[in-house]
Amino acid sequence: MYIDPQGLLYIVGAISLLWVTGFLCWALYETARFMRRANGLLEEIQEKVDMVEAFVDDVIEKVSALAGYLDVVMNVGETIAGFLGRGREETKPKRKKRRRLLGLGSDEE
């Protein structure tokens, strides 16, 4: 049983073609697996980004609502400060008059 060189070349070529085909199938499988993992990862990232976006929107909404109340609170605070300021201005001259009447204050004023 003698194998001529051309027959040997065909056998080696067939085995090589079989190995190349197997390698390409394995590479395609690994690529598909990698893409599937990447797709799952991107879906998880998208979910996390949506959660963060919803949280930020809620915070902005609450801060905006508080900003409306802050204006009212500041106006009330200014009004109260105005009343307290006027009350102190009116009280100080009364004390001076009282001290003068009692003879405790200085007459230089």
Image: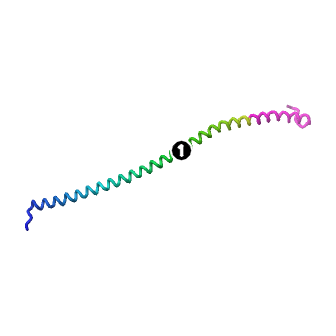
Residue 50 lies, in percent from the top left, at 48, 46
Q: Nearer the viewer, residue 1 or 107?
A: 1
Query: Which secondary structure dominates the residues rendered in magenta?
Result: helix
* Kind of residue at badge 1: Val
Secondary structure under badge 1?
A: helix
Name the residue rendered at 15%, 61% in the picture. Answer: 12
Q: Is residue 69 above or below residue 20?
A: above
Give the labeled residue for mark 1: 56
Residue 89 lies, in percent from the top left, at 79, 33
Per the image, is 90 magenta?
yes
Name the residue rendered at 50%, 44% in the picture. Answer: 53
Residue 6 found in image quarter: bottom left
Mark 1 neighbour density, 10 Å: few (under 14) some (14–19) many (20 or more) = few
Please, which residue is most extreme toward the bottom here? 1
Name the residue rendered at 20%, 59% in the picture. Answer: 18
Range of magenta residues = 82-109
